[in-house]
Image (cartoon, grey):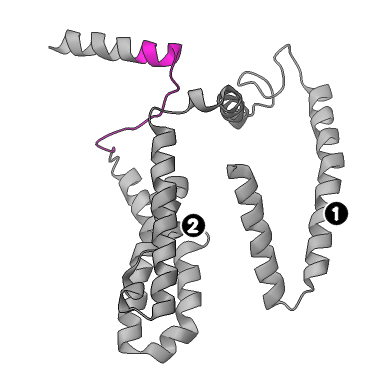
Amino acid sequence: MNAASQISANVMQDFKTGYLTLTSPQVMLTGQIYGIILGAIINPCIYYAFKETVRGKQPIGSLKSEFPCPYAGVYRAIGIIGMGGVKELPKHCVSFCTVAFFITLAMNSFKLVSQKKGWTIMNYLPSMTALALPFFTGPYVAIPMCIGSVVIYVWNKVDGQSAEVLSSAVAAGLTCGEGLFTLPTALLTMKKVRPPICMKFLPSGKELGEVDSFLSSFASANS
């Protein structure tokens, strides 16, 4: 799902760029199709070339091979978890998703009704898409969006005309590329600041049992 949404977002961004450059949408779509076809032909050839030139007995992509691919293990683990079905998800994950779905449905329905009725409260209802973004992207997108929301609110109060014209460019500068969160991240890294907590989701089964037993023995040793 994440890969499909990422590709769809990239295609939509290409369509926006084509709109700004007065490029035909048909040409953009055709170019995407040609790119996929060429990639399906060229990429296996490149992989085969690497495979034939690798030295040693280590398979290509492994950490000890001549051409390591660290992300391969990550995506393999994701694939294994995905093949396991719902039982591989963290505890209460399905319940959380179900509750979030109905909250989103109710909030969006209420927003549509308030817009149709002209209620003032519609201006204060949150965007559920914006609420969901931090779960997928982390704080480096959510924090610039929060700051940008405050900036656009104050900007509209001070000079609404310039805000309407220039707000899109300012928003793009806050969220595109490395974003606004890169600077504080770099400062925290330079100061060697560590997060106070660490969170990791584990599938139920043998791995979870091993972690629980380790934490129990660790707590007993320090007590």
Q: Which residues are magenta?
A: 194-211
| Residue 203 part of the magenta segment | yes
Q: Is residue 140 something one can see in this rendering?
A: no
* Contact check, label 1 and label 2, Cβ < 8 Å: no
Q: Above or below — where is 167 with respect to 80?
A: below
Q: Above or below — where is 59 with respect to 103?
A: above
Residue toward you, 145 or 104 = 104
Examine the image and state in which quarter residue 1 appears.
Answer: top right
Examine the image and state in which quarter residue 147 appears.
Answer: bottom left
Q: Earlier in the sequence, mark 1 or mark 2?
A: 1
Question: Where is residue 184 shown, x and y percent of the image?
Answer: 34, 54
Q: Is residue 210 something one can see in this rendering?
A: yes
Q: Above or below — where is 222 with respect to 117?
A: above
Examine the image and state in which quarter residue 47 appears.
Answer: top right
Q: Above or below — where is 21 with respect to 87?
A: below
The extreme left residue here reads 223
Residue lying at 73% horizontally and 11% vertically, measured from the top left: 57
Q: Which residue is mark 2?
A: 178
Label 2: few (<14), some (14–19) or many (≥20) C-alpha neighbours in 10 Å: few
Q: Quadrant of the C terminus?
A: top left
Most common secondary structure along the magenta stretch: loop
Residue lying at 46% horizontally and 49% vertically, measured from the top left: 137
Question: Where is residue 28 shown, x and y percent of the image?
Answer: 78, 65
Q: Left or right? Give the position of 194 relative to 31.
A: left
Q: Left or right? Give the position of 82 relative to 184.
A: right
Q: Which residue is mark 1?
A: 34
- Given the image, on which type of amino acid does mark 1 rest? Tyr
